[in-house]
């Protein structure tokens, strides 16, 4: 019973002592409507539930994931171990994985969140399917209301939002205090093809009729790991973008990393540092843990009248979900080429970690 187990030794131990190591990868779990129907014999006869389950397991491309039943074996298990190998790991949102049918199964969720596992990167609302729609809604609200950033982070973000609105009224009075937000991921982000220079982002952020999604003269708050607009931390093939010759830079290294194109378009730009240096002693922003500043920026971006983020970024994804909670989900876009209007598609749900879906709120 040594507590000094690490790495593969620990993983092997957890697998050996587990009651169940389910092969959940690429699937979602379904919960029956009543606790006496763990094999879903009765539930399968309910046409409306089966129709919901088919929609739940589908995606925008017409594919349907397989479902696994919350069985008697899982009900009786004391220790469920989700390994990180290809058959067992969960790489999707929890809400796209588990489907419950009965409040009596509520106790399982308590166990689910304390499962020791290697990888569980999946939206909660795409992981669990409940046969009872009321239970499905309950757990979405539970996650929304209780699995959130703490009050210190919320208050710090609120202070920034108030200051941004003040700046918007001062520098963009025509917008009545409304401001716009962007998340521009650069640095060591592994998906090189979504790292665009400012002029390309401007070109992408246009409606089909040619008008700009973010108008001229707007105040725009940018959450980014490159506030100086130099891409100093950008790497391609383990080499800094600054080492490549201008005019011959590879994908992932913007030829012009500056934000000048935004300024030329008439935007007034604001970054986190603009408000950090002005924060008075005793303010929530001054007191917040520096490690939580990314979470603060997430909440600031969630309050923009329009937000555009980086495709494949889970930081952008969570901003989208919080905006959905605020009723702003439909005014959310990507500035990445080929994906600008992806979040406006009509399919309500889906699986995987690359984006959020309106079914989550």
Image (spheres, rainbow, N blue to C red):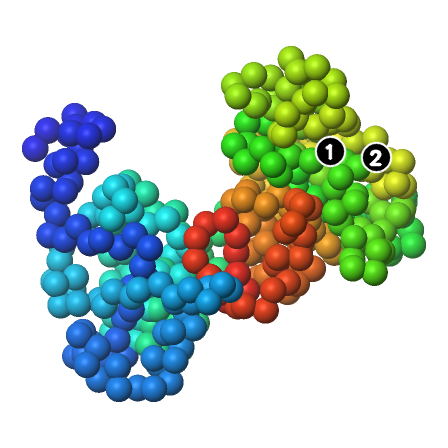
Tell me where residue 193 sits by quadrant: top right
| Residue at the image point whose x is 59% and y is 50% from the top | 319
How many numbered discs? 2
Q: Is residue 199 left or right of residue 335?
A: right
Residue under label 2: 261
Mark 1 vs mark 2, CA separation in Å: 9 Å
Residue at horizontal 30%, vertical 52%?
25
Residue nearest the viewer, comparing 76 with 151: 76
Q: In which quarter of the image is residue 264?
A: top right
Q: Is residue 242 above or below residue 213?
A: above
* First in residue order: circle 1 vs circle 2: 1
Image coords of residue 100 (percent x, y): 31, 71
Asked which secondary structure carries label 2, the reply is helix
Decide: is 56 above or below 180: below
Of residues 347 and 156, the one drawn nearer to the viewer in this rendering: 347
Kindly tell me whether residue 163 is visible in this rendering: no
Q: In this view, does 352 lie to the left or right of 163?
A: left
Residue 179, labelled with which disc?
none
> How many other residues sit within 10 Å of disc 2, few (<14), some (14-19) or many (≥20)?
some
- Residue 90, given in percent of the width and then of the height, sits at 32, 50
Q: Please tell me which residue is depicted at 16% across the width and 25% down the height of the picture.
A: 4
Where residue 200 sits in the image (x, y, percent)? 76, 39
Q: What element carries label 1?
A: loop
Would you say the residues marked 1 and 2 are in contact, meaning their CB atoms lie under 8 Å apart? Answer: yes
Q: Residue 197 carries which label?
A: 1
Nearer-the-camera pick, 350 or 330: 350
């Amino acid at each position: 019973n040594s507590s000094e187990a690490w790495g593969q030794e620990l993983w092997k131990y957890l697998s050996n002592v587990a009651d169940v190591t389910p092969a959940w990868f690429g699937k979602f779990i379904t919960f029956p409507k009543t606790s006496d129907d763990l094999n879903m014999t009765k539930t399968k006869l309910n046409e409306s539930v089966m129709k919901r389950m088919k929609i739940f397991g589908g995606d925008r491309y017409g594919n349907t994931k397989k479902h696994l039943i919350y069985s008697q074996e899982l009900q009786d298990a004391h220790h469920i171990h989700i390994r990180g190998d290809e058959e067992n790991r969960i790489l999707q949102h929890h809400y796209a994985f588990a489907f419950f049918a009965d409040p009596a199964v509520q106790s399982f969720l308590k166990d689910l969140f304390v499962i020791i596992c290697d990888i569980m990167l999946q939206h909660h609302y795409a992981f669990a399917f409940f046969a009872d729609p009321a239970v499905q809604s309950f757990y979405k609200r539970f996650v929304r209301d209780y699995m959130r950033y703490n009050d210190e982070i919320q208050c710090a973000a609120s202070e920034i939002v108030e200051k941004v609105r003040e700046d918007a009224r001062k520098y963009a009075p025509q917008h009545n205090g409304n401001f716009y937000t962007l998340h521009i991921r650069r640095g060591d982000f592994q998906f090189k093809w979504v790292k665009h220079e400012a002029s390309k982002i401007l070109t992408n952020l246009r409606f089909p009729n040619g008008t700009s999604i973010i108008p001229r003269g707007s105040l725009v708050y940018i959450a980014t790991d490159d506030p100086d607009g130099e891409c100093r931390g950008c790497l391609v093939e383990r080499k800094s973008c600054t080492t490549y010759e201008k005019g011959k830079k590879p994908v992932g290294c913007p030829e012009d990393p500056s934000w000048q194109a935004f300024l030329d378009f008439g935007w007034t730009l604001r970054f986190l540092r603009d408000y950090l240096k002005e924060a008075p002693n005793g303010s929530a922003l001054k007191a917040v843990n520096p490690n939580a500043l990314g979470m603060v920026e997430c909440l600031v971006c969630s309050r923009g009248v329009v937000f555009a983020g980086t495709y494949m970024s889970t930081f952008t994804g969570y901003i989208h979900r919080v905006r959905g909670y605020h009723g702003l989900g439909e005014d959310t876009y990507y500035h990445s080429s080929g994906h600008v209007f992806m979040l406006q598609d009509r399919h309500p749900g889906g699986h995987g970690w690359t984006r959020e879906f309106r079914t989550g709120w």
